[in-house]
Image (cartoon, grey):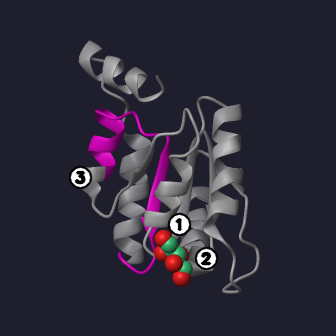
C-alpha cells in the first residue's frame, strides 16, 4: 500500500511520528513535506501535493497533518476525487473508511495526542470500504 504524507509547520512533529510509525508497517510511505521543521508553510500547498499523488495512484491513501486538521480537510476536499476526512477519534476514522470510502486522513497535532493519532492511522489503513450499493452510490454522487 502506498501512503503519501504531508504537513504544514503546525503538524510537522506529528507527521514525523506518523511517518516513523508507518515505516514499521508493510506500507510504502512518501513524505511530501514540510521538510522545514516548525518554519511556517501554507497547508494548501502541501495538501495539493498529497492529493495529486493520491489521484495519480488510485489505490494509495493520503495523510495530512496541520494544527487542527481542519484546513487540511478543506484544502484536500477541493480536489475532485479526493474524500478527505478529519478524524479526531478512532470511530470517525473507521466510519470515514466504511461508509464514505475516505482516501485522505486529516489529523490535528494540536487536537489529539500522538498515541491516539497512531491508533487512528492504523484504523484508517486497516478498515476496508463497505461495498454495499447504497454507500457506493452516495460516494459516486460526491463527484457528480
Ligand atoms: C497554523 O497555525 C494553523 O492555522 C494550521 O496548521 C491549521 O490548523 C489550519 O487549519
The earlier-in-sequence mark between 2 and 1 is: 2
Query: Which residue in the protein does label 2 denote?
Result: 12
Q: Which mark is residue 9?
A: none
Q: Which residues are magenta?
A: 93-112
Cα distance in 3D space between marks 2 and 1: 7 Å
Query: Which residue in the protein does label 3 denote?
Result: 91
Tell whether 116 sits left or right of 40.
left
Q: Are discs 2 and 1 less than 8 Å apart at CB?
A: yes
Tell me the mark number nearer the camera, choosing from 3 and 1.
1
Residue drawn at (55%, 55%) of the image: 75
* In-front residue for pair 75/39: 75
Circle 1 packing at 10 Å, graded few (<14), some (14-19), many (20+), is many
Tell me, yes or no, if residue 29 can be seen here. no
Residue 106 at x, y = what percent? Answer: 46, 58
> Farthest residue toward the top?
133
The earlier-in-sequence mark between 3 and 2 is: 2
Tell whether 25 sits left or right of 55.
left
Amino acid at each position: 500500500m502506498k501512503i503519501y504524507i504531508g504537513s504544514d509547520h503546525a503538524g510537522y512533529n506529528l507527521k514525523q511520528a506518523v511517518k516513523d510509525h508507518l515505516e514499521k508497517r508493510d506500507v510504502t510511505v512518501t513524505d511530501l513535506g514540510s521538510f522545514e521543521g516548525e518554519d511556517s508553510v501554507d497547508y494548501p500547498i502541501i495538501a495539493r501535493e498529497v492529493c495529486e499523488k493520491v489521484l495519480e495512484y488510485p489505490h494509495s491513501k493520503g495523510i495530512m497533518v496541520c494544527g487542527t486538521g481542519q484546513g487540511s480537510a478543506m484544502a484536500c476536499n477541493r480536489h475532485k476525487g479526493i474524500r478527505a476526512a478529519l478524524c479526531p477519534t478512532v470511530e470517525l476514522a473507521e466510519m470515514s473508511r466504511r461508509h464514505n470510502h475516505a482516501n485522505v486522513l486529516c489529523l490535528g497535532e494540536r487536537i489529539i495526542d500522538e498515541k491516539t493519532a497512531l491508533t487512528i492511522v492504523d484504523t484508517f489503513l486497516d478498515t476496508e470500504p463497505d461495498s454495499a450499493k447504497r454507500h457506493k452510490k452516495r460516494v459516486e454522487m460526491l463527484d457528480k
